[in-house]
Amino acid sequence: MDRVNPATEESLDPIESDDEADVEAALALADEVYPAWSERRLEERRQLLQNAAEVLRENEEEYAELMTREMGKPIEGARSEVEKCAWVCEHYAEYAETYLADDVHQSSPEAKALTSYEPLGPILAVMPWNYPFWQVFRFAAPNLVAGNVGLLKHASNVPGCAQAIEEVFLEAGFPEGAFQSLIVGSDPIEDVIADERVRGVTLTGSEPAGRAVAQTAGKELKPSVLELGGSDPFVVLEDADVQTAAEVGTRARTLNSGQSCIAAKRFIVHDAVYDEFVSAFVEEMSGLTVGDPSEDDTDVGPQAREDLMDDVHEQVQETLDAGATLETGGEPLDREGYFYPPTVVSDVPRDATMATDEVFGPAAAVFRVESEDEAVELANDSTYGLGGSVWTEDLDRGERVARRIESGCVFVNELTKSDPRIPFGGVKDSGYGRELSEHGMKEFLNEKTIWVQ
Ligand code: NDP
């Protein structure tokens, strides 16, 4: 696997990929280890997850630097990501017993009827490079503690992270085979999903990858969870705290150098506060520090790959050609590395590229609306439905508007974020199924009914 540091364009040492025999050996080991793993006492699995949290914290700097090197994440964000992975491990170590407790059905008094939650077996996770630790841990923590075993096919540009994550679990004391990384591209994945030893598949990534994986999972009758992209609306109503909305909106658009599925992408602003918002937003966006991701004070690093930066630039250009106005940014930086500056494009026509497509970089599209109804209608005028954010000083109104937005989650006066305690996932082309919380834990469990007469 070739690796390139996106900040310097330097090649990193390549990592040897797994061949067919290695993949077969991994599947055989997963299958072999599963029965004993699933029968281990829950208390022991919880303790191992707690150990994993400790391993993550002990090696935080090493893992953070690895992410920064492989995909260019600003180092402060990389450290927070490792911390968040420790949190999700601790969360499931603490709550697994509660989440996995039987449901006793009181509505059938003539017999004892209950649902028990039982693991399925080896589960495959196809994961992306943008949060190379977090996306994996939010899958692994609930599944491992529930008794499934994990197989990871990570993105081809972060094989070092894939290996490091496998090491975390081994160092924490998990048995060999409970969690394994397959160092492969996407070609063998269809066969891995089809393999009878694999009992389910989850993918986080693009829509085409999601469709390919879901097609195979459907054909093979295996449960799947898809967390695909988003083009989240960030709705600023006329009674919003405009300055705070501009500050939080800037973070929401540029977090992880703009490469986040739940980043705010379409800023839908009421006419009464439009000029004030655009001016504050442009000031915030253009004030960010862009540069070396290994520096503590860098806000925006490089895009993870050159083709991804080129995609963002093309989307901005097409939107300007369609009649939008460039407020700041708009050209790749003239330096080594794949740097795209924080960019704001205003008065975006509804059929322009940045209105219809996901923009996976630090470029924001701003739309003008005349009313709450028009804001909701525009927010919902998307093939995606992942997250959303609504800004208003009237909290009842915020909740009302939130209920009208077609997405997996909406945050009022806050940016959209993932949190181990609450469910996460999308509707429409953003995918299906949920991750995190009790809901995410149950996606790959057999909800078994037991009736005792
Ligand atoms: P991909 O969807 O191609 O990559 C995500 C993962 O899916 C990687 O592990 C990739 O492997 C794998 N994959 C790709 N195609 C297949 C397939 N046919 N069968 C099985 N696995 C597959 O994303 P990109 O890296 O190309 O990014 C492109 C766009 O995807 C971004 O611009 C963004 O819009 C979206 N995206 C969304 C993410 C999210 O968080 N929802 C995360 C990343 C990207 P490999 O790397 O080997 O190709």
Image (cartoon, helix red, strand yellow):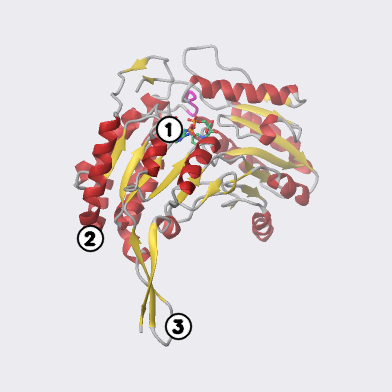
Q: Please provide percent x and percent y for residue 380.
A: 69, 47
Q: Which residue is mark 1?
A: 129
Helix, strand or loop at label 3? It is loop
Q: Please provide percent x and percent y for residue 151.
A: 32, 42
Amino acid type for the residue under numbered disc 1: Trp
Q: Which residue is mark 2?
A: 39
Examine the structure image and report whether residue 302 is included in the region drawn in magenta: yes
Q: Is residue 403 above or below residue 180?
A: below
Closer to the camera in the image, 451 or 133: 451
- For marks 1 and 2, the one nearer the N-term is 2
Q: Is residue 53 above or below residue 191?
A: below
- For marks 3 and 1, the one nearer the N-term is 3
Residue occupying the point 26% across, 48% down: 31
**Range of magenta residues:** 299-303
Amino acid type for the residue under numbered disc 3: Ser
Amino acid type for the residue under numbered disc 2: Glu
Examine the structure image and report whether residue 306 is included in the region drawn in magenta: no
Q: Please provide percent x and percent y for residue 3.
A: 37, 21
Q: Is mark 1 within 8 Å of ligand 1?
A: yes
Q: Which residue is mark 3?
A: 108
Closer to the camera in the image, 72 or 187: 187
